[in-house]
Each structure stands twice: as C-alpha cells, then as structure tokens.
Image: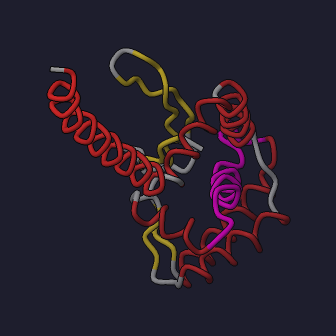
Amino acid sequence: MGAKLTASKTKKFGDMSMARRECHGLRLFGELSMAPMVLNEVTSCWLVNMAAYEACLGAMHPDNFAVSSYISVVALLVNRDEDVKELRGRGIISSSLSDMDAMKFFKWAVPHLRVSHRYFEVFHGLQEYMHQRWLWIATHRFFFNNFKTIATVLFLIGVIAGLFKTIVSLKQPYRSMINT
C-alpha cells in the first residue's frame, strides 16, 4: 500500500503511530511505526493475559488497551504467511513460532479483544493515507508488479528503434548514389 513499516525505538506497545515520511521534501510515503515484540509460546500466553488484565481494568487505567490495540493492528496487517515474514524482516516481530502459527495467533486473538483510541488512530491514519494516495498507490503497485514486463518492452522498443535507425542510415547513401 506504500506505507513503510518500521520498528519504533521504544518498547511500549502503546507507541504506535502512522505518519507521513518525506522524500526530497515531498510527503509521498507513509510510515507505520510499531514497537518490536518477541512472540513464542510463553509470550503469546503473556499477551493474552495482559489483554485480559486490560479488559478487567477497563477505563479506570489511563493507558487502557495498549496490548489489545497492538495485537489488533498486527492482525490487521497480517493476512498471509508472507505478511509475517515482512514483519520479521522489518524487526517488528521476532518469533520462534512458524509464520502460519504466528498468523493464527493474531487472527485467533482479535475477536476477543477490546481496542482503544490507539487502534482507531492508527486505523484512521491508514485509511486516510490510502484515501489520499489512491492514485499513487495504484501507480506504484502497477509498476512494482509489472517491472520485468515494462523493462522487457522498453528494451525491445530500444532494439527495434536501433535497428530501424541503422536500416534508414544504410539506405541514405544508396539513395544519394541513385540521385547523382
């Protein structure tokens, strides 16, 4: 979608943000920043228990539902095994679970979680980014997915143009000899 995933400097689950990134003075790209996490059998149990604790505290705690919101945002991003690999590559998830098991954990947990303003801020930021940059995203996706085909077509056009120019230049001296 054109937004870059980055691991935030802090280790707090609540430190999630969607911001615009500048490139040569233009704000063309989005950046989704999330705290890095370790996911294994033990930490998955801890995450579920922390989310349950957040649900028990409810609105009494000023920093409510940070873990639940974090898990929900990750589940929003993860739809295939390759998505988990992308999160691993970006340093957001470090897991001893397989990609499929990690995806199943996030998808399993989401229906049981309550989310806070953090989730809605990130979700709204992603939606706004996609809405404002739909043409740029579609263009980027087209060129990214068809790069090899485009390069091949341009190469063939260059070769054909070169051959055509060579043929035309070879016929020029022949025409001048006929006219004299």
Identify the residue at image location x=53%, y=29%: 19
Direction from residue 90 to residue 141 in the image, left or right: right
Residue farthest to the right? 111
Q: Is residue 132 magenta?
A: no
Quadrant of the image containing the N terminus: top right
Determine the image quadrant of residue 176: top left
Q: How far across and down, in percent of the image, does residue 162 sit?
A: 27, 42
Determine the image quadrant of residue 25: top left
Q: Which residues are magenta?
A: 60-80
Direction from residue 11 to residue 16 in the image, left or right: right
Its colouring scheme is secondary structure
Direction from residue 161 to residue 57 in the image, left or right: right
Identify the residue at image location x=23%, y=36%: 171
Numbered marks: total: 0
Residue nearest the viewer, comparing 89 with 1: 1
Q: How far across and down, in percent of the image, does residue 145 sit?
A: 53, 54
Is the magenta region chiefly helix, strand or loop?
helix
Determine the image quadrant of residue 111: bottom right
Identify the residue at image location x=71%, y=43%: 119
Q: How far across and down, in percent of the image, does residue 150 sit?
A: 46, 49
Q: How far across and down, in percent of the image, does residue 58 sit?
A: 81, 48
Identify the residue at image location x=43%, y=70%: 94
Question: Does 165 appear above or below 103?
Answer: above
Quadrant of the image containing the C terminus: top left
Residue nearest the viewer, comparing 67 with 27: 27
